[in-house]
Amino acid sequence: MSTYLELNRELTPAQTALKAETHKFAEEVLRPASLELDKLADPQDVIKKDSVLWEVLRKAYAAGYHTQSLPEFLGGAELPALERHILAEEMGWGSADLAIAIGVAAFPFTVGAGLAALTGNQKLMEEVVLPFIRDKEAKYIGCWAITEPEHGSDSLLAGVQQFHDAKITFQVGAKQDGDDWVINGQKAAWISLGTIATHALTFLTVDPSQGMAGGGVAIIPLDLPGVSKGPPLNKLGQRALNQGEIFFDDVRIPRHYMVIEPMAYPMALDWTLSGANAGMGACFTGVARAAFEEALAYCKQRIQGGKPLSEHQLVQKTLFDMFMKVEAARALSRAALVYNTNTVPPAVQYSIAAKVFCTQTAFEVASDAVQLFGGMGLCKELLVEKLFRDARASTIEDGTNEVLSLAGARRVVDKY
């Protein structure tokens, strides 16, 4: 297991043990499975019943990783923020796609737990949250259904005035009918775990007169009548993270499954964006570290010009630049995650900064790693080629870095 400096503080024995345990899981379970799934030509094979994907999810659930953010009094692990960063970085080091899958699988249930406790929604707690917490076999799998055919990163700009004035709405909408909500519309093919999820944390429009600000959030069981799914995408990177469309055709959900209505929607979007972007920053710090470590090990043993690559000064400069970027990514992503976990309301601009900086860092470091490997870096048999593709995908997912920067800039201009 690699070592690196803890610039901010020494880890406690419990944190060191968590890091070692998670690293072992990433090294022995996540990385081998991710490499195996990456080689499958047909993305349908990734989600087959006998796929190694299901073995990974079952092992993750059995270890309790799916409950890392859920309260201890409900049976969750309730890891503190720093421990969650350690876990996300180690899992990202092993496999970005499977690390994200484990994280997003818990999303509807974690949000549901917080809101059910806040509002006293006992039915939601009993029907959705508690069965997930008790699940050790990956029977309950969540997804975040926000992206649509006509709405990608713009759906994260609800607080920007031009989108409010334009009255842009989600393509998925909800209308109340008695004690039920009726859901109609389509979510795009970029919904992570959309092809296998049992529940969707669905962002939709409740009040079209307010545009995106008139949004709501519903937890929708995906076995209800009127729900259908598209096939998984055939992607460049993160191929183990299956993604696909979800269609809603007069889907009826009980009132207590509509967990956020327009009055609270902007706050809910901020909380979601803050948590998701901070998690992405931590995960792709791990990806950047993996690429750096692969390049460093290769340069120490590869002979060129009569000596190891690592003894050539230009290579040394490249390696040191990579090292600096990894350490900077860890410092920023850790600070953002810890701060926003303990701050109400969260300072979303810091989580956005972590996501944008760390994913761009992962892409740059992985690109440098490919360059240092030379022609071998282009070979699919080597890990750095996959790390490069996975890192490239990260600058688009959970909001493109360009649009997220605009959302962050709005907050900096208004609040700094």
Image: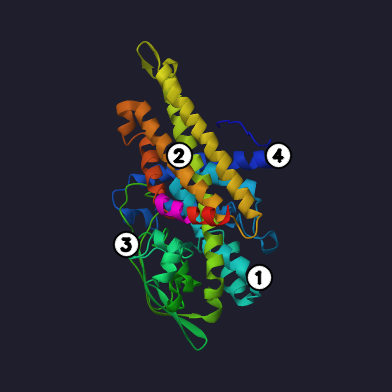
Asked whether the residues under the numbered discs 4 and 1 touch, taking CB atoms below 8 Å apart as contact, a structural biologist would say no
Q: Position of residue 54 (x, y in %)?
A: 45, 55
In which quadrant of the rendered view does residue 361 lie? top left
Q: Secondary structure at mark 2?
A: helix
Colouring style: rainbow
Which one is in front, 139 or 22? Answer: 22
Going 41% across and 16% down the picture, which residue do you hit? 312
Tag 3: amino acid: Pro
- Dot placed on the residue nearer the N-terminal end, 1 or 2: 1
Tag 2: amino acid: Thr
Please give the label number shown on residue 361. Answer: 2
Q: Is residue 227 magenta?
A: no
In the image, the segment drawn in magenta is 400-407
> Which tag is nearer the camera, tag 4 or tag 3?
4
- Dot placed on the residue nearer the N-terminal end, 4 or 2: 4
Q: Which residue is mark 4?
A: 12
> Which tag is nearer the camera, tag 2 or tag 3?
2
Q: Position of residue 25 (x, y in %)?
A: 54, 43
Q: Is residue 227 left or right of residue 139?
A: left
